[in-house]
Image: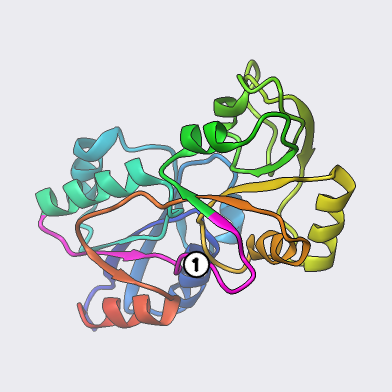
Amino acid sequence: MSAPFPVLLLAGTGEARALAGRLAGDPRFHVTASLAGAVERPEVYPVRVRIGGFGGSQGLDTWLRGEGIAALVDATHPFAARISANAVVASRAAGIPLVRLERPAWQAAPGDDWQEVADLDEAAAGLPQGARPFLAVGRKEISRFSHRRDLDCLTRMIDPPEPGTLLPPGRLVLARPSRDVDAEAALLEQHGATHVVTKNSGGPWGEAKLLAARRLGLPVIMVRRPELIGGEVVADVPAALAWLEARL
């Protein structure tokens, strides 16, 4: 029997956890899941886990070569643009194939009132004077709204912000997104929300707030995903598995 096929999985999403679970019991593969360490719990990955950065694309290239990795799967968040860009450069330098496992983006549907913007600075600028937005944009860039002292924000994030982070005015809620549309609608109504601001992360985990906004007739300011060039792209775990099997 040949040696297991060594794979590096850049993780941190539900898709990454699902793929790791599918690969863990397959003797054809030897998988290392890499976590940045911000929110993820390493114990939910039933494979070898590595925590921390690589030191840019050059550091990742060195690690790939040193570990003899034969394929790289980027299953990071759609807005983890720096990690994904480093993966493209490092995979090319190391001469190994790369696939990006990226959940499909959300699409506006009848009844939606979406304004697409390029980044969070444009989102902050697009809110009218005195708005009461629901901000679901994560903790790392929340300070981009802090200068808008005219706003009354309901800000939700999973983990608390770093000490010293400048926060927008209003209320901070530490919670994971609910998949219950009624609960999301009740939260928006309780705040008297006038807008929903979010990144186009895609997937089922944060979609309920968009369905609630549609129900309540609230405008959504939607930040477009960053453009990534390089590597193949698949939309789900079965397709990622098929891509890996084709390289055995």
Q: Answer with left or right where residue 200 lies relative to residue 167.
A: left
> Foreground: 150 or 39?
150
What amino acid type is highlighted by mark number 1?
Answer: Glu
> Foreground: 234 or 248?
234
The residue that mark 1 highlights is 15
Q: Is residue 99 magenta?
A: yes
Q: Position of residue 36 (x, y in %)?
A: 46, 42
Q: Is residue 140 visible?
A: no
The part of the chain drawn in magenta is 95-114
Residue displayed at 55% across by 37% down: 126
Q: Is residue 130 magenta?
A: no
Q: Answer with left or right where residue 191 lies relative to residue 209.
A: right
- Looking at the rendered image, the quarter that the C terminus falls into is bottom left
Residue displayed at 72% across by 35% down: 131
Q: Residue furthest top?
A: 164
Q: Is residue 106 visible?
A: yes
Q: Position of residue 30 (x, y in %)?
A: 34, 67
Magenta segment, principal secondary structure? Answer: loop
Q: Position of residue 84 (x, y in %)?
A: 32, 49
Residue displayed at 61% across by 69% down: 204
- For label 1, count other residues whose C-alpha is less than 10 Å away and answer few (under 14), some (14-19) or many (20+): many
Q: Position of residue 15 (x, y in %)?
A: 50, 67
Which of the colour schemes (rainbow, by chain, secondary structure, one colour) is used? rainbow
Residue displayed at 68% across by 38% down: 159
Q: Answer with left or right where residue 22 lies relative to residue 139.
A: left
Quadrant hosting residue 70: bottom left
